[in-house]
Amino acid sequence: MSTRARVTQIEPPAVTGGNALLILVGLGVAFLLITALLGAAKAGGNLFNESNLLYVALIFYAGAGALYMGFGVTGTAKYVKYASICTAIGFVANTLAVAHRWYLSGRPPFASIYEMLLSFVWTLALLTLVAEKKFGVKIIGSITMPLAVVCVILMQLLPSEVRPLVPALQSTWLHVHVTLAMLSYATCAVSFALAMMFLIKDSFSTESFLAWTSALVSGIYLGIVATRFERWGGLSVTAWDAQNKSDVFLGRGVRLFVTIPDLGWLFVIALLGALVPLALYFLARFRHNVSYLAVANKAVFVGIMLQLVVLGAFVLRTKDSTYASPFQDGLYPTSLAASPFMLGGMVAAIFASLLYLMLLWRRNDLQDLLPSGDTLDRVTYKTICIAFPLLTGMIATGAFWANRTWGSYWSWDPKETWAAITWLVYAGYLHMRVTRGWRGRRAAYFAILGFGVVIFTFLGVTYLLPGLHAYA
Amino acid sequence: MALDVLSIPKKIYRTLANLRTGVVLLILVVIASALGTFVLQRPVTEPDKLQAAYSPQTLRLLDRLTLTDIFHSWWFLSLLALVSMSIIFVSIERFPNAWRFFARPYRKTDSHFRSANPYKLELPIRQADQGLNAAERALEKLRWPVERIVDNGDTSLYAEKNRFSVMAVYLIHASLLLIFLGGIIDGVFGFSGFMAIPQGEQRNVIELKNGKTKQLPFSVQCKSAGQENYADGSPKRWWSKLAVVESGKEIEAKEIVVNDPLVYHGLRFYQASYWIDNKKVDGLRIAYSGMESTLMPLELRFNQPVNLDSETTAKLVEFLPDAFVRDGQVFKKTENLGNLAFALEVTNRADNSTTKIWLFPAEGNVVGAENVKFQFKNPTSAKDIDFSPVTGLEISYEPGQWFVWAGCLLMGVGLFVAFYMVHMRIWAVEVRDAQGKLVLWIGGAANKNKDRFEQKFSEVVAEIRNELDKSTPTGRPSVQQHSEHPVLTMVGTK
């Protein structure tokens, strides 16, 4: 079939001098570190406090992400080695940040979404390093590091004060349950990255990656537009109470929304921009015409530009401004901190598109750098063999803790139910592998589906479905 | 036609014992559960929230389709029952084979077996039994349990580890069934409810979640209850000092907090909430003055007389949250906090008179104190009024929970065995190879983690070589190296 032929590449940049990007990233990291140091020194106080350390971790994770991307653009293999070093340094800074917060609050960091993200990013960095060193999957960081960067950006926006624990959260079982949750989610994230690597190595067609990436980006923007587009053309965001550093609530669980005029149209344009490559993909398939795909790839590039413009507009217009609300009279302030997940979704969409372009331009180099498909398949399986008992432990300890706190070990709470669904999906993966011999592609799809369910359980349930688990 | 019709029960059994059926059932469970998280569920949602979220017609439709209480609906419970039956039947189907294997996993080392085995190697030997002895010593050194099997005069060695791991999957599924059993027991015999006990009182009736009430054979008394706050005012902990009272005697007492319940006769009393009852007052702090007109503080506890002087006592006897005065009489207006009114009973032992005096802090006036020698001042702030706290207890009775926890532990064991215990087997037998030379054939097999087993197999082979070297007189090369590397061929995929 002609659509299975190799996709015509849009002009990839020529392989530049091997050290150019290294020097650039090195300078960038140094510059950011120095300005951070100066800023911290000027502000006084402890230089090695948690937020500074986290910022250092962010700088290095971003450096690692940039180097992985750089590899995508120039094909220089040694970027991967330095990216790995950046990840390691970032991990050390992250560990120190966690330690500092633990020391200050007297308990491990598990009580708010900020703290959960802190633990998650730490585990992600640790598992990235383990996967690289022990299993030889050297470029797993190209997926996990952007994820870490998104999470740390989110954290910079979320309220970060050490809050004392409400009565229901004061229990050792809490620590055990949340530790298991973070470990298992991070392991699932790594298995997702490995399954993606498998698909890359297994010659999963680049056009299919195009279709799925466009579908993901469209899905993110569709979600934002469907829930937040206000007539006519405004975007509704949560109002922000700067004094209490929290969302403004009209009543229990009911947030106050304000409308930013005209921003909604920009998001619609970004959505259309994401749908174009998807539409072109389908046209290419049904008309058996490969040239549509070349246009689709150009459209992805244009789409990234559009997304950057929309992101910039969103940041500029949400940053500490006041707008009117359809619910009650008056002008109310909003802030970036009020919309962390919209911001996170947009940044994730940009990263996904960039990763696709990296795949498009450097697929052969990537495939050479990866271990064999068989190894990747086996390591994915082994990772899920680690994740599954952790998930089981998470659910069991959660049930035990719930029984001690609320007198019922299973109340079909949305979070509990979705955790069980996640468990069943991964149990399905293991079943299909052991009893039906599912390997390779089918196993990889299942692993990717599993992680999608994990994302929904971790984030979707908290923000779309309310319930007892309202703490995180 | 009648001959090839299986009986209906057999057909049902066959369908349920099918792996594909199990998968379909699980997919249905997943869809139903997901639906139960998207549609508001009645047991955990307040009625006004339901009415705010859905129009009356939608709500009626959802109720009719049992979508507002999916997890207790007949079809969902039937699905879970079918899943359980499927697990049981599939296990029954597969267990005999697994048991047969578990009982006798040894295989005859005939030529067909030897050529088909995935891991194998041949080492040349000089004389009979040299190979077997060396292999036995090597395996024992590496701590493999070895046995000699004699079959028709032929001797072979068989060593294995972790035979138990083939049973892991049955352990895991049995633990799932145990957990379901616990859930069923709790569904049928368990209950949960709520009990509010004002401080100082005792109660023995539970309001169950389904609206009914349950009378306990004992009472729970709340001796005192309180709340501690953090510096910023948010609640840190709620506590209650409870006592179990049976036939008037105190059997057991415990101070409970959230996360640490009182357990008695299988019933668990959890600290769920705490609030102030605005209909009851435990104490009051006011000031009074006699003839000297110096103000003296007066601390009154409800119904406890306090001496004002040698012949007069005062007692706090009544509290109205919202009162009004008409024709010199005080009446209750509403149940909500409004115009607070406190009644003091002043008793004069000298002339045996009792006067009821009313204090109204809101307006600051006192009613009915004209004939009394003392003047009473109203309380000056809310801190002077001790409203009575009420402790809110959640009660649950879950006899099946022990099966659930046992199931969880068993599943932990099962998962550990399934993932981390590898069933490994090693055979050694002396045979003549294709050229007729005497060789020691070594074979191995593992049920998972094949790459790790390759290492272990190489270890064993190296040790056997070692032993063979040692057992041959020096000077002559003992093991002719056909190939430096063992031929490790794999049949099939990993």
Image: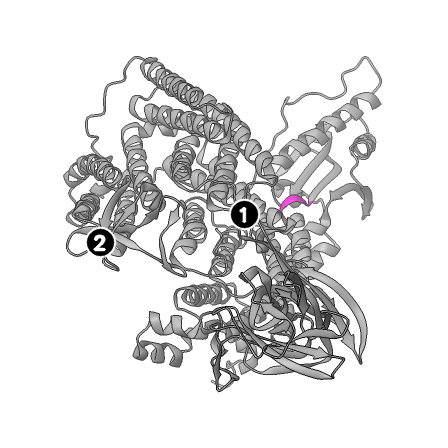
Residue B420 is one of the magenta-drawn residues: yes
Position in image of residue B402 (x %, y %): 70, 65
Q: Chain of mark 2?
A: A
Give the class, few, some or many, for how many residues have Cα within 10 Å of label 2's Cα (few <14, many ≥20). many
Mark 1: which amino acid?
A: Ala
Residue span colored magenta: B419-423
Relative depth, front residue between A73 and B436: A73
Q: Quadrant of the rendered structure where residue A257 is?
A: bottom left
Position in image of residue B248 (x %, y %): 80, 79
Q: Is residue B241 above or below residue B481?
A: below
SS class, disc 1: helix
Residue with the mark numbered 2: A229
Give the class, few, some or many, for how many residues have Cα within 10 Å of label 1's Cα (few <14, many ≥20). many
Scheme by which the image is coloured = one colour
Res B285 seen here: no
SS class, disc 2: strand
Residue with the mark numbered 1: A181
Relative depth, front residue between A227 and A285: A227
Q: Residue at x 85, y 18 (%)?
A: B473
**Residue that extends furthest to the front in the rendered view of this protein:** B292
Q: Quadrant of the rendered structure where residue B7 is?
A: bottom right
Position in image of residue A367 (x %, y %): 38, 30
Q: Main secondary structure of the magenta part?
A: loop
Q: Residue at x 54, y 66 (%)?
A: A411
Q: Residue at x 50, y 60 (%)?
A: A468
Q: Which circle marks residue B472 in the picture?
A: none
Mark 2: which amino acid?
A: Phe
